[in-house]
Image: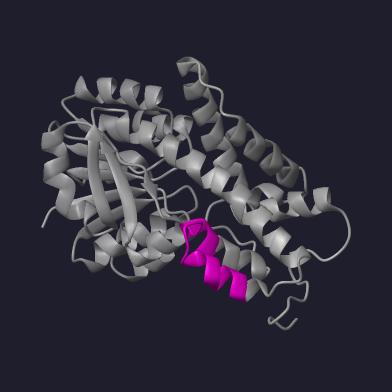
Amino acid sequence: MAELGFVGLGIMGAPMAGHLLRAGHRLVVHSRTRSKADPLLAAGAAWADAPAGVAARCGVLFINVTDSPDVEQVLFGPGGAAEALRPGSTVVDFSTISPDATRDFARRLAAREIHLLDAPVTGGDIGARNATLTIMVGGPVEAFERVRPLLDCVGKRIVHVGPSGAGQALKACNQVLCAVNMIAVCEALLLARRSGLDLNQALDTLGSGAGGSWAWTNLGRRIIDGDLNPAFMVRLIQKDLRIVQDAAQRAGLPLPGTALAQQLFRAVEAESGGGALGTQAMIRAYERLAGGGPSCEPGAPQPGHPA
């Protein structure tokens, strides 16, 4: 069985790489912080000191890093993967980056006869751990069909949505939903708490109704439990929303709900360490706006939920 490569072992990348390894694939990995690779190395993965070292040993390279410049560095920077990938190889980029950057990278790799698939994911850390991610893929259909069995190892719903950059464009739409849903979750929970309702009962009851959502069920629960650990960091969704607003500006579209979410997340970022909290930390901005009285502040006693 040919080796696979994986660069970027953060909250999402590490469990995704683990699924490939447990499926029986030989895996070579690299991450800026080597300690993040330790569990994978203990399970049988091999280490490379640079992306080029990973690329030299694999025909399919997976990337999951933060932003467009990070992907460019992995591919084309010193010790980058492009210099070592063989013609006919495929790069699958799970990162969330600019559609324009993706199309540029695809052209540069195509000149080397290397295929690029933009394959951003949604489903959060829970989806990454449980291999239930939704993966939206842009790029050559033939390359997609070749790697589809590998994508099945890490995701539950995998959809080819169009040419290069289409996956990133759809992911931008997804991030609008995530950001504006977070507004709704915070407002509904705060109103329920101020109305003297049992938040646990409210979460369960509304989760099965027309207003229910992944964010309500999963991030609403974390808010009630006082858990602001990230399924997705505030600083990362802010990066994504900048991509969204760039696309909206080019399309001549106002996105006032997205702009409000950016302002609320910016207020959380202004706190020390706020950018590293999960997006559910938006509740902190709402509680400051709401002033005193009963709130959903983490650790506050809730009806039916002992302190």
Q: Between residue 267 and residue 39, name the one nearer to us.
A: 267
Specify the segment rendered in magenta.
201-218
**Viewed as shown, does residue 194 lie left or right of 1?**
right
From where the camera sits, is residue 63 visible?
A: yes
Q: Position of residue 135 (x, y in %)?
A: 31, 47
Q: Quadrant of residue 230?
A: bottom right
The C terminus, quarter of image: bottom right
- Kindly identify the residue that appears in the image at 58 percent across and 35 percent down: 258
Quadrant position of the N terminus in the picture: bottom left
Q: Picture coordinates of residue 200 (x, y %)? A: 62, 75
In the image, residue 291 sits, relative to residue 254, either above or below, namely below
Residue 281 visible: no
Query: Residue at image x 66%, y 47%?
Result: 275
Asked whether residue 170 is drawn in magenta, I would say no
Residue 157 to residue 164: above or below: below
Q: Residue at x 21, y 66 (%)?
A: 23
Asked if residue 49 is positioned above or below residue 214 in the image, the reply reads above
Q: How is the image coloured?
A: one colour
- Can you give x and y, in whole percent of width and height, for residue 31 in the image? 43, 50
- Front residue of 254/15: it is 254
List x then y, in percent, for residue 298.
73, 67
**Helix, strand or loop for the magenta stretch, by majority:** helix
Q: Is residue 242 above or below residue 191?
A: above
The mark tally for this picture is 0
Q: Is residue 278 left or right of residue 1?
A: right
Residue at the location (68% across, 68% down)? Answer: 226
